[in-house]
Amino acid sequence: QVQLVQSGAEVKKPGTSVKVSCKASGYTFISYYMYWVRQAPGQGLEWMGIINSRGGSTNYAQKFQGRVTMTRDTSTSTVYMELSSLRSEDTAVYYCARGYSYGDFWGQGTLVTVSS
Amino acid sequence: DIQMTQSPSTLSASVGDRVTITCRASQSVSSWLAWYQQKPGKAPKLLIYKASSLETGVPSRFSGSGSGTEFTLTISSLQPDDFATYYCQHYNSYYQTFGQGTKLEIK
């Protein structure tokens, strides 16, 4: 069965970076894109960007350009999302989701807390 | 950028009710629209894609319609498990945007 398993919760200080992983199983990894969405406490869903799991090309939401980097490791079927220059407003649950368009499978979410 | 606006923001209803949630796009998005259900502390769950296609395993009481700029999600007979927050999502090549969400509460 398809599974996306994300790394555990993180607590980071302002100005630092965080790298969240999303390990895929149960399907051919390179056949699907993966995208990242975040959700601040009590807020809605915010699309961050997408990565082509086969070739590694990316497209980021304008809001995160210059601060986000998405990569993948085909040998371990894992995608990564790194967000730099963290600020308190980046406190959120970060989700990976499989798909080029709509997300048919989602990770369980990773809480990133930014606090001094 | 295309903006997606959902209404209402909150909806109170009873078990057995028929409910409709609306999602409007700031410009035409053809049928490139999906609907998700999210429960507290859980990841979103895909319900509908391409405006009206029911995802495998989703109960048939959920249906989607619309094209262009106006879309609806309808639940024909509310069940206790349906009380959650619902989001619409526009998707196209390399870009996505979500509506702000509609919280469906028990009356």
Image (cartoon, grey):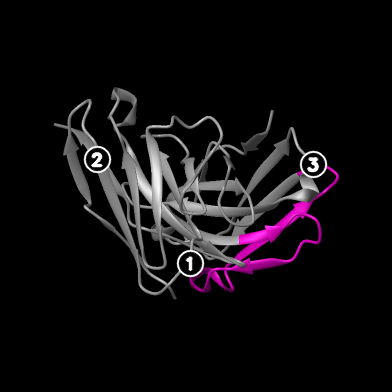
Q: Which mark is residue A28?
A: 3
Chain bearing mark 1: B
Q: Which mark is residue B60?
A: none
Query: Toward which corner of the image does residue B56 lie, by quadrant?
Result: top right
Q: Is residue A69 above or below residue A39?
A: below
| Tags 3 and 2 on a common chain | no
Relative horizontal placement of residue B5, taking residue A83 as reference (left or right)? left
Q: In the image, which residues are magenta?
A: A50-77
Chain bearing mark 3: A
Magenta-drawn stretch contains A69 = yes
Secondary structure beneath dot 3 equals loop
Mark 1 belongs to which amino acid? Ser
Q: CA distance from mark 3 to mark 2?
A: 38 Å
| Tags 1 and 3 on a common chain | no
Secondary structure beneath dot 2 equals strand
Q: CA distance from mark 1 to mark 2?
A: 24 Å
Packing grade of label 1 (10 A; few <14, some 14-19, many >=20) is some
Between residues B21 and B39, which one lies in front from this camera angle? B21
Residue B4 x/y as whole percent: 36, 64
Q: Which residue is mark 1?
A: B30
Q: Which residue is mark 2?
A: B19
Magenta-drawn stretch contains A73 = yes
Mark 3 belongs to which amino acid? Thr
Residue at point 64%, 68% (across, down): A59
Residue B7 x/y as whole percent: 24, 55
Relative horizontal placement of residue B99, taking residue A52 as reference (left or right)? left
Badge nearest the viewer, 1 or 3: 1
Q: Are marks 3 and 2 in contact (CB under 8 Å)?
A: no
Q: CA distance from mark 1 to mark 3?
A: 30 Å
Chain bearing mark 2: B
- The tag earlier along the polypeptide, 1 or 2, is 2
Residue B1: tell me if it is visible: yes
